[in-house]
Image (tube, rainbow, N blue to C red):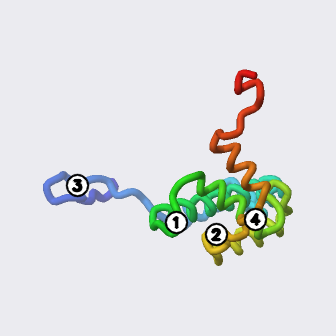
């Protein structure tokens, strides 16, 4: 008759299960052996996704600087400051974000982290391309059909 063990003082004694190294050894021999997973490096992200991510990061950095400068009154209020800052970034870097390559986007983002666009607003002085697009955004220019002619 197996020996009865008490788990608690208030309970009647129970049955002690048998233990042996032979049971553990038998389990180790019979358990299924799963192949160890081979560590794989994650597939590199396609350049288009990386470029899109960097372009979005540039847009977010420009918008953040515009909001910061507008709330701290570093630049005169009025107009679309984010549009003005995007134009400054385009003039300083020499090309727009849409035409930049991956290394150029990375360089632009690092430049933007080190510099303030408000310090470079003088790039837009006398710039006919920016003046035309700013005028168009304000609604002063209307096509002939929209003016009712």
Q: Residues within 10 Å of mark 2 (few under 14, many from 20)?
A: many
Location of residue 112 with respect to 95 vertically, above or below: below
Q: Earlier in the sequence, mark 3 or mark 4?
A: 3
**Nearest-to-viewer mark from 4 and 2:** 2
Residue at label 3?
Answer: 13
Distance Cα–Cα, label 4 vs label 1: 48 Å
Residue at the extreme front:
149
Residue depicted at 75% across the width and 69% down the height = 108
Residue depicted at 72% across the width and 59% down the height = 87
Q: Residues within 10 Å of mark 4 (few under 14, many from 20)?
A: few
Say whether residue 9 is left or right of residue 117: left
Q: Earlier in the sequence, mark 4 or mark 2?
A: 4
**Nearest-to-viewer mark from 3 and 4:** 4
Q: Earlier in the sequence, mark 2 or mark 3?
A: 3
Image quarter of the C terminus: top right
Residue 121 x/y as whole percent: 66, 68
Residue at label 4?
Answer: 39
Residue at label 1?
Answer: 69
Query: Is the Cβ of the residue at disc 3 closer than 8 Å to that at disc 1?
Result: no
Residue 114 occupies quadrant: bottom right
Tell me, yes or no, if residue 34 can be seen here: no
Label ID, residue 117? 2
Residue depicted at 66% across the width and 40% down the height = 140
Residue at the extreme left:
10
Q: Secondary structure at mark 4?
A: loop
Q: Residues within 10 Å of mark 3 (few under 14, many from 20)?
A: few
Residue 142 x/y as whole percent: 71, 34
Query: Is the Cβ of the residue at disc 1 closer than 8 Å to that at disc 2?
Result: yes
């Amino acid at each position: 008759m197996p020996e009865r063990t008490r788990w608690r003082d208030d309970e009647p004694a129970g049955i002690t299960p048998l233990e042996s190294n032979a049971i553990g050894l038998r389990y180790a021999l019979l358990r299924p052996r799963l192949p160890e997973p081979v560590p794989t490096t994650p597939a590199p992200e396609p350049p288009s996704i990386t470029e899109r991510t960097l372009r979005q990061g540039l847009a977010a950095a420009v918008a953040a600087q515009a909001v910061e400068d507008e709330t701290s009154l570093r630049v005169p209020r009025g107009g679309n400051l984010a549009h003005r800052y995007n134009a400054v970034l385009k003039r300083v870097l020499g090309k727009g974000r849409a035409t930049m390559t991956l290394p150029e986007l990375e360089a632009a983002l690092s430049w933007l982290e080190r510099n303030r666009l408000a310090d470079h607003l003088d790039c837009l002085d006398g710039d006919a391309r920016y003046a035309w697009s700013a005028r168009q955004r304000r609604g002063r220019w209307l096509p002939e059909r929209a003016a009712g002619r």
